[in-house]
Amino acid sequence: MARFRNKKKVAFVKPAKKQPSQNVDHVTGDKIPRSFVFSRLKLPATLKQLQADLRKVMLPYTALNLKEKKRNNLKDFLNVAGPMGVTHFLMLSKTGTSPYLRVARTPQGPTLTFKIREYSLAVDIANSQLRPRVPKDLFKNSPLIVLSGFGTGEQHLKLTTIMFQNIFPAIDINTVKLSSCQRIVLLNYNKETKLIDFRHYSIRLQPVGVSRRIRKFVQNHKVPDLSSLQDVSDFITKAGYGSESEGDEEAATVSLASDVGRVNKASTKSAVKLQEIGPRMTLDLIKIEDGLCSGTIIYGNRWEEGPW
């Protein structure tokens, strides 16, 4: 009787698709900047809150809940930064007279040291406003960066420009989604005082010529209470809501290339409104070093520095 050999079936394993690197922008192909915001030495409560505010500014590519210990030194953060793809450090400190902010490129520098002349926390900005606006998805995407007044040709301002341009992801104007542009960081250099104003805004679009009541109705998905009205037209033409004059100036309007939300449609005009969300800082650039918190001083005074 003939015997048959059982042939082993060879399983075919489909090669796994190569996953795109989380450190590379899948559109531009550039490395995504990531940051650590931490303090050196002990900070008072207000500066601790400023540190928390700066972490929110740097979202989503930062460690929002980064834990620090007294024994941690700069080398500890640097050892962790490499595997996590961290490209920048923002470091706060405080002397007996002034707070300082250092912005550094890892792992080899350069490092910019700023004296913080004045600052306001995000909570202070919100308390000063009648209707603070912080939507839940506001920090889902990185902010846009706008630099004003830095084009003087001075070397230290060129380095400052490069540092802040590279601290946030670049955008491709041909592929960027308008709905993802919800925040803006503005840095303005004052040539007379030689100080830098740091501001953080949310971006809001409002369709021109649409009443506030209609806007709210479309956005909230709620059926309005018409029990006290004689006709549905009264809902639209009721005093105080029949027109929308705020933000209708030509200089404050744009024509949209695509839909943004439920009320801002493509090829229609919308008013662009900025609302400050904080924090707010007035910065004085006092030193630039070519290394990471060390090295040759490119600009500034070696004696004017924080406790490092």
Image: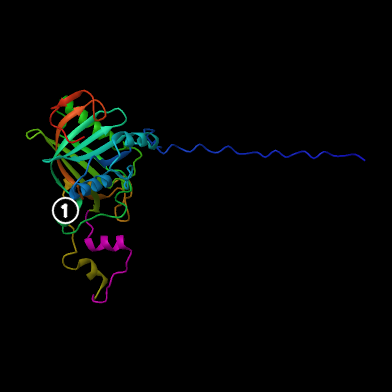
Tell me which residue sits at (41%, 39%) in the image.
22
Where residue 281 appears, as percent x and y from the top left, is 16, 43
Magenta residue span: 208-229
Instruction: Tell whether position 226 is magenta.
Output: yes
Q: Which residue is mark 1?
A: 124
Q: What colouring does the structure picture have?
A: rainbow
Would residue 121 appear left or right of 224 to someone viewing this image?
left
Crowding at mark 1 (Cα within 10 Å: few <14, some 14-19, many 20+): some
Tell me which residue sits at (18%, 49%) in the image.
46
Look at the numbered disc 1 and give the secondary structure of its residue: helix
Q: Is residue 65 visible?
A: yes
The residue furthest left is 192
Query: Which quarter of the figure has residue 38?
Result: top left
Instruction: Tell whether position 156 is magenta.
Output: no
- Quadrant where the C terminus is found in the figure: top left
State the residue in front, 121 or 164: 121
- Quadrant where the N terminus is found in the figure: top right
Would residue 113 appear left or right of 26 to someone viewing this image?
left
Q: Is residue 255 visible?
A: no
State the residue in front, 179 or 242: 179
Q: In the displayed structure, would residue 199 be above or below residue 75?
A: below
Q: Amino acid at mark 1?
A: Asp
Query: Which quarter of the figure has residue 171?
Result: top left
Q: In the displayed structure, would residue 112 be above or below residue 197?
A: above
User: How many numbered marks are there?
Assistant: 1
The residue furthest front is 71
Where residue 248 appears, as percent x and y from the top left, is 17, 52
Tell me which residue sits at (12%, 41%) in the image.
96
Where residue 275 appears, as percent x and y from the top left, is 19, 51
Where residue 43 appears, as percent x and y from the top left, is 20, 45
